[in-house]
Image (cartoon, rainbow, N blue to C red):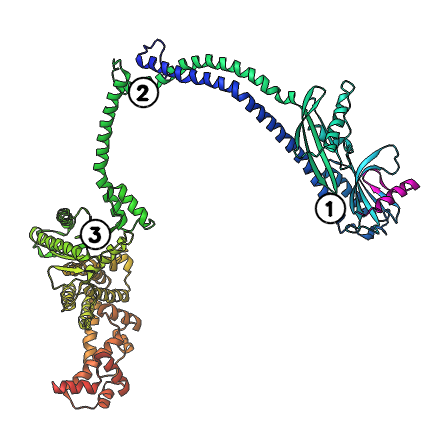
Amino acid sequence: MSRPKGKHKGSIYWKNLSIVLLITCIPIALISVILYYIGTDRIGMEVNKAHQNQLSQSIQHMEDYLSNLEHTVVRLAFDRSMDESLKQMDFIMEFQKTNELMRSFTLMRESNSLIGGVSLYLRDANKLIGDEFGFQSVQSEDDRKLLRSLLEKERTIYWNYSLRKPGYSDTLYKAIVVKLPGGQMYDSYGAFILYLDQAKLNTMVQKLASGEGVAFLINENGDYLTTPHTNELSKEELTLEDAVRSRIAQEDLRDHTFKFDWQGQSYTVSYGEISKLGGKWTFVSATPMSQIIAPVTSLSRLILWISLFGLTVGLLLSWFASNKIYDPIYRLKSLFESSKPTRSDEKDEVTYIENQWNQQLVEQQTLAMQIKESIPTLRESFLLQFLQGNLYTHTESELIDKMKQLDWDAEDKRFAVMVAQLHGISELGGKFSERDSQLITFAASNIILELCSEKLNMVHVINFQDLSVGVFFVLNRSITNEEIKAVLNKLAHDYIAAVNNVLRMKVTIVTSKISDSLVDMPNVLEQTRKALRFRDLHTSNQMLDMNQFMIEPNSAKHFPSELEREIVHAVSLGLEEEAVRLIRLFIQELQGDNSTELMVHQGMMKLLGTLHDTIIKHDVNMYALYEGVHLYEQLMLLSEPDQIVDWFQYKLIHPFIKTLSMTYDGNLREVIDKLLVQIKEEILMDVSLEMYADQLQMSSSKLSKAFRQIHGTNFIDTIIRLRIEKCKELLCKTDMKINEIAELLHYQPSYLIRMFKKSEGLTPRQYREKHAQG
């Protein structure tokens, strides 16, 4: 938002303008004076230093070219392919190798711009190969002497600053001679000759001279390596080069930079040495001092003009800056006004902004209070997810940080859980129905939350919706284990008393172990809930402590197998009421002394498995009969005996008996019942399934299936059971020997003894002695 024109400017604006004028103009004036009197010399020194740095970089650039040339020469001298086989090489017949050799010369020349040409001289073959003229024989005697003289030098690699090319007599070249083979000073069979490109060398050196200055290159003998620059308009440049060269050669100059006066003008001379390939070159550059300090002189004048201009601009900027400083104040005021239905006429913008800011702080505090009030709900949701194990990917530190965000400090704390299970809803005499279990659980969770809030600060109550509640405690590490146990035990006693008095129900409470790790608490809660299965069914209210909890090695419990068989038989006969009566007796047998809920559940699971097998034997589709329900899972959710009996009656037995009665008509059942009576009367005869099937005029398979589905056992097992009963009767009422009884029952004596012991757990002799004593 820009400030509208014509806006009234108060005292704040004029104060700001005065301050900005002082801040802007006075420093500019001081800086201008300092720059003019002090900065000029400093700038001159920096310009000269920059000039020297530029020369140094240029010399280094040229030295890099020479280093590249040196590396090329050394590789060439010791190249294994350049052996003495070149002496016998036929350059015409071995055209391919010749072509590759000439191509390598071309690549060598192109790799370094200082190389103007490459030639290979072979003494015995009297051949000269070059990248410019191909290969040829040396015709002239002068050329042969010249080339052979190159091989007579003692050094393997050396410079020749005035070498004539064979076939040319008018031009001398600077060249590098590399004798072959490399590393031998005598008896060389040939040599490489690398000619320098004089024009390229001149150009490279002259680039280092600026303006009216000169630059040249001399060797260790003081001879020019670059062509002296001549100009018809200024002949003194050549004289200047000679004078500088003489000064460097005659005097022992230690510094690489010195001043040199020549014809009324001062020059700054810089020189440096480059040692490559056995040669010692000196690079010299002479630049007029007037040319170097020219920028400083012009800069000094420019500083004065800039200072005056800066002062003027400072005044304008002061006015502009004052407006800009005032703009934020106006924009902030307008921002507050835009959120209000009416504009304020407050003249003092600062006072207005202050009032509005205080109002915003009040609104912010109100919002912070609302957020703080919502934190408990967010914390409840987080803890529910965490304790259910849904945040298993989080680390300890991540969980602690998250709880800190939710206003709980769980760092360096200890943790514990308590689980309570309510029992006896069926004993309330109809006061509560099964549908009221969630309401009862809600009331129980409120009771324990109220009791915990009186003694502990960080407590979370979990409503499991199944007559059980859990409590998660965050405890201070300074409290000892004994003190924590005392607090939790007192809390458990108070909760049991409150539930007994208010809800008229029994309670089992399990207290977990005290843990130092927050991330382990979901597992601790799960283990604590599992411990509820070990409650004593004969005790109304119980307290279990996981710190002292252990499964006692009770003596082996008697499993009511006989009742189990009777229940199966009643179910198979379709006697629902009888089966339910027997199931109640079965539970009472399981609830013997020192029995726990887990033991009762295990026994009922065994009974469910037996009934499950019986139903399958009757060829009943379990999935269709029970609509895909997981029977074992439903049974595990029940804890009250009455609930378990009702579940067996209405969820398991009744649907099966209803289906069974629909499958078989009454006539077939009557026939099978009469057959069973006949079998009991004829048990001492040699009876068989086929015999009775023929008598009833039906197939043996149909009779076997009907017998099993109606009575729950197959024909053979029934015959064996009846004969065992007959054997028991004969053992107790007669003095017949075992062999005689076996013959009467149509069994082998050994088979009868084995079957009898399997059924009764005793041999026939032991059974007779036991009942004789009775």
Report whether residue 299 is seen.
yes
**Element assignment for label 1:** helix
For the N terminus, the image quarter is: top left
Where does the image place residue 537, in percent across and percent down from the top left? Answer: 14, 63
For the residues labelled 3 and 2, the Cα–Cα distance comes to 52 Å
Q: Amino acid at mark 1?
A: Val
For the C terminus, the image quarter is: bottom left
Which residue is tagged 3?
478
Looking at the rendering, the stretch of residues picked out in magenta corresponds to: 129-154
Residue 359 circle label: none
**Element assignment for label 2:** helix
The residue under the point 78% across, 33% down is: 223
Where does the image place residue 739, in percent across and percent down from the top left? Answer: 24, 90
Q: Residue 137 in magenta?
A: yes
* Dot in front, 2 or 1: 1
Describe residue 428's horizontal placement relative to residue 227 as left or right: left
User: Are circles 2 and 1 on residues that touch, CB within 8 Å?
Assistant: no
Q: Amino acid at mark 3?
A: Ser
Q: Residue 667 in magenta?
A: no
In the displayed structure, would residue 463 be above or below residue 13? below
Residue 74 circle label: 1
**731 or 135: nearer the eye?**
135
The residue under the point 25% across, 15% down is: 344
**Res 655 → quadrant:** bottom left
Which residue is tagged 2?
332
